[in-house]
Image (tube, rainbow, N blue to C red):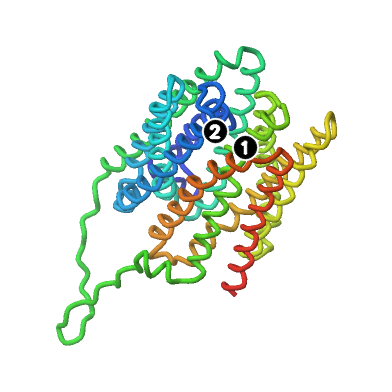
């Protein structure tokens, strides 16, 4: 499995094999992506507290994994870190499918956090190792498409299986299928690691430094540390925005929105999966045209568009609670589409801003801070959202999510002002 691409910069076979495995893994995760909070609270009988504990455990483990895995990935072991992380995901989903109480559910959350944290630390380094610099932008676009296409396919398949069978008996097997679907990705990471270790290192040829008067050559200065990065106001605001994007947006569509749809609006599990599949379909179909339009905007402006669209999406969800039939279906479709376009705006702006504000020498540290901010958001978001939905009515719950998106909007506006 070659780590290099084509002479014109196109990705090679190793990268395409990795993307095929990523598609399979994402499809497996998509089978259960919108259902975990319902599965834990209802099918396992652990209630909202049990579901919240799972997501908190996942986020806490994700923080620890990012801290430990990031330096390993930076030292040239990114593929090995990815293999360990994906294996942890396999174990997590297999355990959750067989779980019967709070202890295995918590253990599954911890394993999932380790898996996602290590994958986050590894995947960028693996892609850049497999693809020449000239083709890396296209490679990251394809990676994003494969992830979202897989999630959409999985959500559609999960919904069809639930509609055709008995949900109580089908759900545990969906988690076992999710575990099996990630095995090829773990194997691909391991193959990439072994291939790169097998490539002979090029001997170091010491350069003759041009140093006056026979003095010692100056070393390149060390990159700024974490404290120095966080003293930068744009970086600090970007990390705050990242935490809020996770808290008020991405985790809510996984943990809280399914409960609003299922408990508050009486929509079946197949319908919940259909909303998730619609979101993924819009991502797949509109990613490229929307991203091209967003390129005309500065990254700060594109980042502002994301929470604006999410405010509108959650507003559509609130309106759907007051309607039924075709009108409700149309409003929920609008929710899925608006949220997806907001995701595109986020993905088109956040990483370029991270690169610009961190600088090339500190991008690894900046990425680690981003991962920790994300994990903080995933720890806070699900229990907070579930608590709000449990304590309020369905319409109020949707409006609370819109208020959360408005808080993200305020931070992105401040970031734009600061970065000018």
Q: Are marks 2 and 1 in contact (CB under 8 Å)?
A: yes
Which numbered disc flags the more N-terminal residue, 2 or 1?
2
Give the number of the disc on residue 48. 2
Q: Is residue 404 above or below residue 327?
A: below
Furthest toward the left, the residue is 214
Quadrant for the C terminus, please.
bottom right
Q: Is residue 138 above or below residue 257?
A: below
Instruction: Check disc 1 and report its element: helix, strand or loop.
Output: helix
Furthest toward the bottom, the residue is 213
Visible residue check, residue 8 = no
Gap between marks 2 and 1 measured at Cα: 8 Å
Frontmost residue, 287 versus 118: 118
Quadrant for the N terminus, please.
top left
Residue drawn at the location 38% of the way across and 65% of the way down: 361
Query: Would residue 242 appear left or right of 302 to someone viewing this image?
Result: left
Query: How many residues crowd mark 1 within 10 Å: few (<14), some (14–19), many (20+)?
Result: some
Visible residue check, residue 414 = yes
Residue drawn at the location 50% of the way across and 27% of the way down: 46
Name which quarter of the figure residue 408 lies in: bottom right
Query: How many residues crowd mark 2 within 10 Å: few (<14), some (14–19), many (20+)?
Result: many
Could you say where residue 146 lies in the image, as x and y percent from the top left? 56, 38
Q: Is residue 193 above or below residue 248?
A: above
Could you say where residue 172 lies in the image, as x and y percent from the top left? 50, 19
Frontmost residue, 6 versus 38: 38
Q: Which residue is mark 1?
A: 390
Furthest toward the front, the residue is 391
Name which quarter of the figure residue 352 lies in: bottom right
Query: Would residue 312 appear left or right of 46 to someone viewing this image?
Result: right
Instruction: Check disc 2 and report its element: helix, strand or loop.
Output: helix
Give the number of the disc on residue 216. none
């Amino acid at each position: 499995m070659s780590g290099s691409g084509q002479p014109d910069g196109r990705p090679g076979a190793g990268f395409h094999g990795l993307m095929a495995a990523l598609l399979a893994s994402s499809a497996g995760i998509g089978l259960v992506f919108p259902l975990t909070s319902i599965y834990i609270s209802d099918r396992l009988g652990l209630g909202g507290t049990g579901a919240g504990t799972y997501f908190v455990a996942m986020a806490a483990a994700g923080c620890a994994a990012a801290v430990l895995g990031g330096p390993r990935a930076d030292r040239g072991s990114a593929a090995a870190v990815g293999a360990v992380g994906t294996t942890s995901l396999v174990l997590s989903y297999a355990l959750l499918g067989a779980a019967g109480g709070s202890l295995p559910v918590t253990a599954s959350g911890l394993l999932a956090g380790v898996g996602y944290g290590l994958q986050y630390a590894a995947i960028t380094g693996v892609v850049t190792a497999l693809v020449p610099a000239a083709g890396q932008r296209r490679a990251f676009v394809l990676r994003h498409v494969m992830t979202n296409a897989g999630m959409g396919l999985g959500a559609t398949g999960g919904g069809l299986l639930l509609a055709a069978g008995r949900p109580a008996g089908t759900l545990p097997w969906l988690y076992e299928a999710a575990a099996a679907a990630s095995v090829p990705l773990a194997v691909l990471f391991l193959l990439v690691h072994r291939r790169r270790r097998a490539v002979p290192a090029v001997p170091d040829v010491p350069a003759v430094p041009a140093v006056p008067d026979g003095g010692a050559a100056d070393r390149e200065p060390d990159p700024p540390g974490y404290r120095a990065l966080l003293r930068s106001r744009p970086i600090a605001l970007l990390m705050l925005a990242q935490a809020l994007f996770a808290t008020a947006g991405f985790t809510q569509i996984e943990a809280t929105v399914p409960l609003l749809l299922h408990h508050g609006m009486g929509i079946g599990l197949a319908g919940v999966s259909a909303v998730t599949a619609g979101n993924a379909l819009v991502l797949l179909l509109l990613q490229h045209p929307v991203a091209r339009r967003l390129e005309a905007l500065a990254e700060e402006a594109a980042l502002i568009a994301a929470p604006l669209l999410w405010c509108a999406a959650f507003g559509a969800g609130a309106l759907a609670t007051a309607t039924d039939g075709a009108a409700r279906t149309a409003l929920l479709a609008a929710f899925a589409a608006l949220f997806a376009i907001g995701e595109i705006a986020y993905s088109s702006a956040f990483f370029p801003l991270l690169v610009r504000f961190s600088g090339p020498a500190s991008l690894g540290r900046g990425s680690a801070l981003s991962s920790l901010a994300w994990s903080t958001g995933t720890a806070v978001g699900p229990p907070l959202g579930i608590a709000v939905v449990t304590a309020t009515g369905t319409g109020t719950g949707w409006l609370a999510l819109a208020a959360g998106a408005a808080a993200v909007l305020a931070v992105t506006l401040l970031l734009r002002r600061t970065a000018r």
